[in-house]
Image: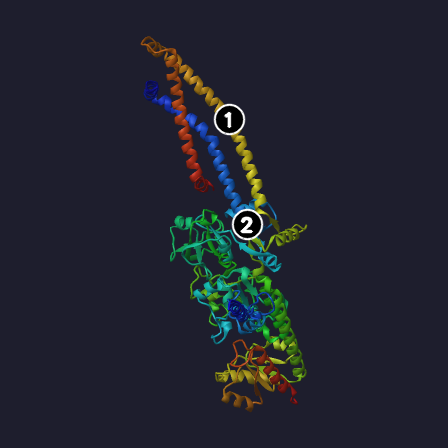
Amino acid sequence: MTDILYLAWRYLRFNRGKAAVLVASISLILFLPAGLQVVVRQGAKTLTARADATPLLLGAPGSAVDLTLAALYFRAPTLEPMRYNQVSRVAESGLAEAIPLHLRYDVRGQRIVGTSPDYLEFRDLELQVGRRFALLGECVLGADAAEALDAGVGDYVLSSPASAFDVAGSFPLKMPVVGVLAASGTADDEAVLVDLKTAWVIAGLAHGHTDVTAPGAESGVLERQEGNVVANASVLSYTEITSDNLSSFHFHGDPSGFPVDAVVVVPRDRKSGVMLRGRYEEAGRDVQMVVPRAVVDDLVETMFSIRNAILAVSLGLGAATVATTALVFALSIRLRRRELETMRRIGASHQRIRAILATEVVLVAITAGIIAAGLTLTVSRFGGTMLRLLAP
Amino acid sequence: MRSGFVAILIVTLVTLGGCAPAESPEDVVGTTTPVTGASALGTIEVSNYPLAYVVERLAGPLVELSFRAAEAPDPAYWRPSVEEIIAMQEADLVIVNGAGYEGWLKDVSLPTSRLLDTTAAVHDRLIRIEASTTHSHGLEGEHEHAGSAFTTWLDPTLLIEQARAASQGLERRWPDHAEYFADRLQDLVAELEILDAELQAATAAAAEHPVIFSHPVYQYLQQRYGLSGHSVHWEPDEAPAEGQWEELEHLMANHRAESMVWEAEPLAETSERLAEVGLGSVVVDPCSTPPSDGDLLTVMRRNTEVLRMLFASAP
């Protein structure tokens, strides 16, 4: 037996190029369905876990998928924002807690999530270092966000403009980092968490500046009206909130109308959840309430459908690869006629020659199988991370 | 001998069983009898004394009450430190007055699920401060959010609504004790309604007795009971400047007042000079800080007596 193995191994080693190509193509065709199955299952599990942990979402009317992806994975929101009084309405119902999310801005690609301290408790987010945001303007970084921004407690991060053409629409705010979260393996790792009011400051709905109503502030006054002073453009807003100017920050307009992109709704119990959903299903509502698990289940079903299609295609590819491999071996045997004849003349029986050829095939197949298994294990271990890195 | 031993054993066991501490009504949880000396259900933060009084009345020893601004000269202008904000974030409930009382609220981050604004439901009854000046940016800009008067508790009917809001918050947080809170709310409401009736009787003739308020903190008292008055900005422990006396003189030329209503006892020389211009001094304590004796209702009843005497005298 060892002589058969030896001869098969020496042949493959001598023709290493051909063997490598065969091993690569067979391992790929084996890995493709297995790896796809692992990735899809992992993706579904991650999506489902995050959705399971989020009972209900409230958002503007529109695509439930867009709302869910924005609220759960902090994708850039595509729906119009809601008014803040929708958050109050949920809270006042007594049926659920309402956790607001503002998602319009980012810090060099890391989404700024304007919310309340409830969010950290709701997601069980632990602090690795520092503390929660307590004052207007402070931020807490997710583990990956801290690495991407190269920032830690005591550093500052600057919010990015909403777009290159929105120079006057939002206010770059320099925010002190007061805490960094421990890694959670979720979208929260990439977030820059701030108080909702801080997000409104970035949006230009609240700001601080010198007191234009005070005597001696004439240089900043455009016009004096009854009960109101109109400030001119020379009155600049502070770009950083400090202990010295904190009390000067104020809102313009009614905060109940300020924007919120989504609300995480946490019902007190199952009955309360059903009652709430019933209320929000009434026609004519200016908001929609969705069950994230249902939306994600639809997405996962789509993913599995796509996976099945790819598997069907890969089956065909697999058959073609097997046929091609068989053809390669058949052609190889034909080309080795003289070699095989020499083996027969020096005493190898037909059976022994067939065994050597079969062993070559088995060695290639085993090697391809080992490589495919290794790749599948790698994907099962790091697939989630790879997906997050590759996803836009 | 043996039967005697058994009899002694039985008597001993019965005696020991009788000495075992009976379940005290005070140890029963979930009824209208509170737990005393046991661990509290949770912590409640409040922002002023009237709310501390209300929560004490509603929840008593069931909760641990935290009033961090108790030592501040005026809780309305108290500002929490970062450490205090972090501690407040951990509280089971943060009960605030609202109506702009807590100027620091817009600058801090508190869990919205546990933040209870006791005047949110009576927003339409809040008094906008007409004398305040807002600002806007550019001719088309939105105005700064205007302020409102915040001493809402001086109107017992508003304080009742605040108590109701607080009770509702307590019931939602600890539903097992809802009946306990509701019973105590009922008692408190009854007392406040009596107080309201007494104040109404005491101020029946208020329209005929114009007053000057030393500080603009009596708006809700004025609104509820039809007091005729204008406000200045005088502090009881500070001698008014000459400019302030001139302002008063100008005010009195158009508003024939008989008395100045103070938050606390004014300086003797201030009272004397006021008497010279025909103004008596009376103290109606807004009670935003814990009183040196008694409680909120004690102070409000004392205020009622002061007002009764003030408006009972002939014009």
Horizontal and vertical percent position of residue A167: 48, 52
Residue at (49% x, 49% y) in the render = A165
Q: Which residue is mark 2?
A: A54
- Any part of residue B81 in sight: yes
| B199 in relation to A252, above or below | below
- Please, what secondary structure does the residue beneath circle 2 have? loop
Q: Quadrant of residue A178?
A: bottom left
Tell me the subunit letter for badge 2: A
Q: Who is closer to the viewer here, A309 or B33?
A: B33
Horizontal and vertical percent position of residue B201: 67, 82
- Gap between marks 2 and 1 measured at Cα: 38 Å
Q: Who is closer to the viewer here, A58 or B299?
A: B299
Instruction: Indicate the colouring scheme.
Output: rainbow
Horizontal and vertical percent position of residue B284: 57, 82
Report whether A346 appears left or right of B58: left
Q: How many marks?
A: 2
Horizontal and vertical percent position of residue A148: 40, 48
Q: Who is closer to the viewer here, A300 or B221?
A: A300
Q: Which residue is mark 1?
A: A315
10 Å neighbourhood of mark 2: few (<14), some, or many (≥20)? many
Q: Amino acid at mark 2?
A: Thr
- Any part of residue A77 in sight: no
Same subunit under labels 2 and 1? Answer: yes
Q: Earlier in the sequence, mark 2 or mark 1?
A: 2
Tell me the subunit letter for badge 1: A
